[in-house]
Amino acid sequence: MVRKALGILLTLFAVSIIIFSLVRLIPGDPAAAALGDQASREQIEQFRREMGLDKPIPQQYLIFISSLLRGKLGLSGITFHDAMKDILYYFPATLELTLVAMTLAFVLGVLIGVSAGLTENKKLDGLLSFLSIGGLSLPTFLVAITLQVIVGNLFPSFLITGRIGSNFNIPRVTGLDLIDSLLAANSAAFFSVLECLILPASALMLGPLATIMRLVRANTLREKGKSYIANLRANGLPRSLLAWRYLLPNAVSPALTLAGLQFAELLGGSFVIETIFVFPGVGWLGVQAMIAKDVNMIQGVALMAALYFVLTNTVVDFLHTRIDPRIRLKEQ
Amino acid sequence: MAKSRLIQEARRKGDDWTEAMKYSLSLYRKDDLAVAGAVILSCLFFIAIFAYQIAPYPQDAYVSHFQNRLLPPSQTHLFGTDEAGRDLLSRVIIGARISLPMAFVIVLTSMMFGMPLGLIAGMMSGKVESVIMKLADIWIAVPSLVFALAVSAILGPSLTNSVIAIAFSAWPWHARFIRAEVWHIKQETYMEAAESIGASKLYIAVKEALPNALTPYIVKITTDLGYAILLLATLGFLGLGAQTPTPEWGTIAGEGRTFLPNSWWISTMPGIFIFLSVFAFNVVGDGLRNVLGIEEI
C-alpha cells in the first residue's frame, strides 16, 4: 500500500520534471508570450524577474517544488491568484462531469457489448459494430455543437450552458453539485444540475462508450466459444443465466482496464466540451490559460491531469482486484 | 499471438509474397465495410491531390468577399459561405490538403521516435528496457490532448507547432506497442535459432522482429492516422492549432462557432469531413485487422 503511494508520488515528480522542462526549455519566451507584442523590453524583463524566469532552470525547479509542497503553483496571469487555488476550485466540476460520463460509457458499453456478442441477429450485430466505429470517429466538438444547437432549438428553455440554473444558489460542500444539491435537500436544483450535465456528458461519453463496447463484444465472442460454456449449455443452463453469471463478469474485467485508460480520453475531451458548453471546470480553465499563455496555470493543469490519470487508474486497479479474483491472486 | 495470417500465408506458399498479398486482398474485398472505407479514403486522397482543380472557387481558400457573407447552402455555393464570404465547399476541399498530409507527418514523426525506442527496449530488456518503458508510462500520464494543447500553446499556436506537439505526445504508444510485439516474437523458436547461429541482436531486430511486428503495426498506424486528424482538428477548433485563414477543417469549424446556430453550415461541414476521414481510416484498419488475422486490439 505504501509502496503504491510512493510509486504514484515518484511518477508525479517525474511528470512535473517533464512538464516543467518543456515549459521552460521550449523556444519562445513565456514572458514575452504572456505579455503580448505591445510590451516593451523593460516590461518583459520585469515580468521575467517577477516570475523568477531569469534564474537557472534547476533553481527554478527547486523553487517550484518547494512552493508546490506549500500548496502554491505560482501566480496565474489570468486570474491573478495562485493557480492552485483556481484549479482546486474548478476541479470538482470536471470530476463530476467525467465520472458521470465514464459511468454511462462503462455501463452502457458493457451491456451493449455483451448483447452484441450474444445476439444471433447478424444484422443487429453489424449495425452495432458500424455505429460503434462511427461513435469513435465522431469529433467531440461536432457532437457537442450539434447537440447544443438541436436541443437548444427544439427546447428553448433547456439549459445548454453552465452547471446549474442561474436562479439556484447551493452551498458548496463537496463541490460536486449533484451531491451538494441533495445535501441542501433542493430537488429542483438537483434536476437542474442533471439538466446541465446531460448534454455535455452524452457528448463526452460517446468515444469511450464505443471503444468499451467493441472490446466487450470481442471478448464476449471469444468467451462464447470456450468449452466451459458449451458444457454449461449442455447441462441445461438457460441462456439468460449464462449471460449474467458467466459472460458478463468475464467481460467486465478487461473493460475495467480499458476504462482506466479511457479516463485520459475523457479528461482531454472535457477541455473541448467544457469550452463549448461553458461548463466551469478545469478543462475550460485550461483552454483559457492556454489561449492566454499563462505558463503557471498551464503547468498546473497539466500536472493536475497527470494526477487525475494516476489516481483514477489506481482506483480502477483497486476495483479490478476486488472484482476479479484472478488478478488478486496473481498479485499475491 | 502476433503471427499474422499474411505471414503465415506467405510462409505456406513458400515465401511467395505476391500470392499471400493476393489472398489477403480477396479476403479484404469480401468485407463490405472495409471496402467502403477504402473507397472513401481513395476519394479523399483524390480530392486532396486535385483540390485546386476540383474546388469551384479555389482562390477562396484565402481571399475574402465580404459582400457574400454567411450565405446559406445554395446552387452557387453548395456548402454556403463563411463569415468572410468565402465558399465553404472550396475551403473544405482545400482543407483536405492540410489535414490528410499532416496526419501522415504526425504519425511518421511519432514512429521515428517511438519505433526505435520500442525496438531497443524489446531487444535489450533489462535496465534499458525499464528506463524506456518507465519514461513512456510517465509520458502517457498526461492525456495526449492536454499535452498537445500545452505544448502548442507554449510554442505558439500554428499548424507546424500543433503537428510537432501531437507527434511529441504520441511516441510512447508506438514504443509500447513495438516493445510488446518484440516480446511476443522473442518467445518464438526461430529467434532462438537465429541467436544460436551467431546472429547479432541488431540483425535479429531488423530482419526477424521488425517484419513480424510490422503487420499489427500497420493496423495501429491506420487508427493512429484517424486519431491524428481528430487531434489536429480539435486543436484547430480551440484556436490552438492552425490559425486563420489557414483552411484546416478544425480551424474552419472553430471560426464558425460564433455564428451558431444560424449559420450552422460553417462548423458542421468541415466536421462531417473530419468524421468521414476518421471513419474511413478506422474501418480500413478494422478490415486489415480481420484480413491479416490479428487478434490483439
Image (cartoon, coloured by chain):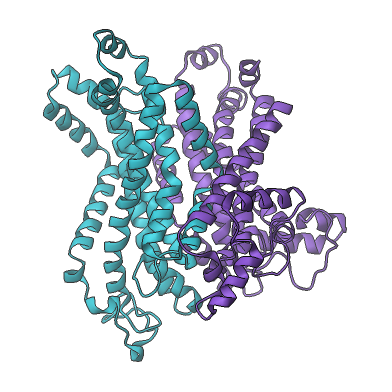
Q: Is residue B54 visible?
A: yes
Rendered shade, chain A: purple
**Snapshot quadrant of residue B84:** bottom left
- The residue that appears at 59% across and 61% down in the rendered structure is A53
- The residue that appears at 32% across and 84% down in the rendered structure is B64
Residue B118 lies left or right of residue A178; in this view the side is left
Count the labels in the image: 0
**Snapshot quadrant of residue B267:** bottom left
When the figure is inspected, residue A265 is found, relative to residue A7, above or below; the finding is: below
Question: Where does the N terminus of chain A fall, quadrant-wise?
Answer: top right
Rendered shade, chain B: cyan
Query: Considering depth in this image, is A220 or B278 the residue closer to the camera?
Result: B278
Query: Considering depth in this image, is B238 or A63 the residue closer to the camera?
Result: A63
Q: Is residue A1 visible?
A: no
When the figure is inspected, residue B265 is found, relative to residue A64, above or below; the finding is: below
Residue A317 lies left or right of residue A82; in this view the side is left
When the figure is inspected, residue A59 is found, relative to residue B93, above or below; the finding is: above
Which x, y percent locates residue A251? 55, 29
Question: Where does the C terminus of chain A fall, quadrant-wise?
Answer: top right
**Snapshot quadrant of residue A125:** top left
Query: Considering depth in this image, is B239 or B274 the residue closer to the camera?
Result: B239
Which x, y percent locates residue A283? 61, 59
Which x, y percent locates residue B203? 25, 22
When the figure is inspected, residue A32 is found, relative to residue B190, above or below; the finding is: below
Which x, y percent locates residue B14? 13, 17
- The residue that appears at 44% across and 20% down in the rendered structure is A225
Residue B225 lies left or right of residue B254; in this view the side is left
